[in-house]
Amino acid sequence: MAATQMLHHLNLSLGGALGYFSLWDESYGLSRTIFKWLLVDFFPEQSRGLRMPLNFVIPHYEQFYFEQEQKLLLDILDKAWITPTEAWGPHPLFGRLTRRQWGKLVLIHIDYHLTQYSA
């Protein structure tokens, strides 16, 4: 995954819940309960080799502009900071999350990808 594709992937993962993108619901009983508890509440960092929601998959041929994706990610993070919990949409795989769960999920997800680029 190129750096621009990674930024777009991060934008999709957070921006969908804030209305930037329209993502379909891929959740199911286990993903909204046990998997959410394990992956969001229990583990301190993002596990390697997880199946990501199909909404977040970026085809290798898709290209993006770094500055545009970087600015969008910063805009999304700014909006996330000021948006009350009840105004957030559901996560495509985990369903409804608390503000604390969203914060942890965003933190470990961004850290996971920045670590891939040794940033």
Image (tube, rainbow, N blue to C red):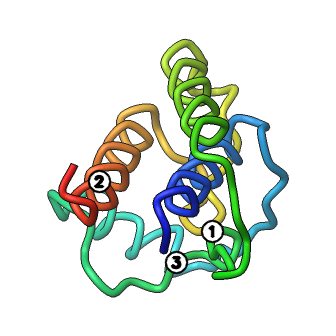
**Depicted 101 relative to depicted 4: above or below:** above
Q: Are marks 1 and 3 in contact (CB under 8 Å)?
A: yes
The quadrant where residue 103 appears: top left
Residue where numbered disc 1 is placed: 56
The answer to whether 92 appears left or right of 20 in the picture is left
Q: Position of residue 51 (x, y in %)?
A: 47, 85
The quadrant where residue 40 appears: bottom left
Q: Position of residue 78 (x, y in %)?
A: 53, 18
Residue where numbered disc 2 is placed: 114
Q: Are marks 1 and 2 in contact (CB under 8 Å)?
A: no
Q: What residue sits 56% from the left and 26% below the top?
A: 85
Q: Who is closer to the viewer here, 68 or 85? A: 68
Q: What residue sits 53% from the left and 52% below the top?
A: 7
Q: Which mark is residue 26?
A: none
Residue where numbered disc 3 is placed: 52
Disc nearest the viewer among 1 and 2: 2
Q: Who is closer to the viewer here, 23 or 58? A: 58
Q: Position of residue 102 (x, y in %)?
A: 44, 41
Q: Secondary structure at mark 1?
A: helix
Q: Tell me the kind of residue under disc 2.
A: Leu
Q: How many marks?
A: 3
Q: Tell me the kind of residue under disc 3.
A: Met
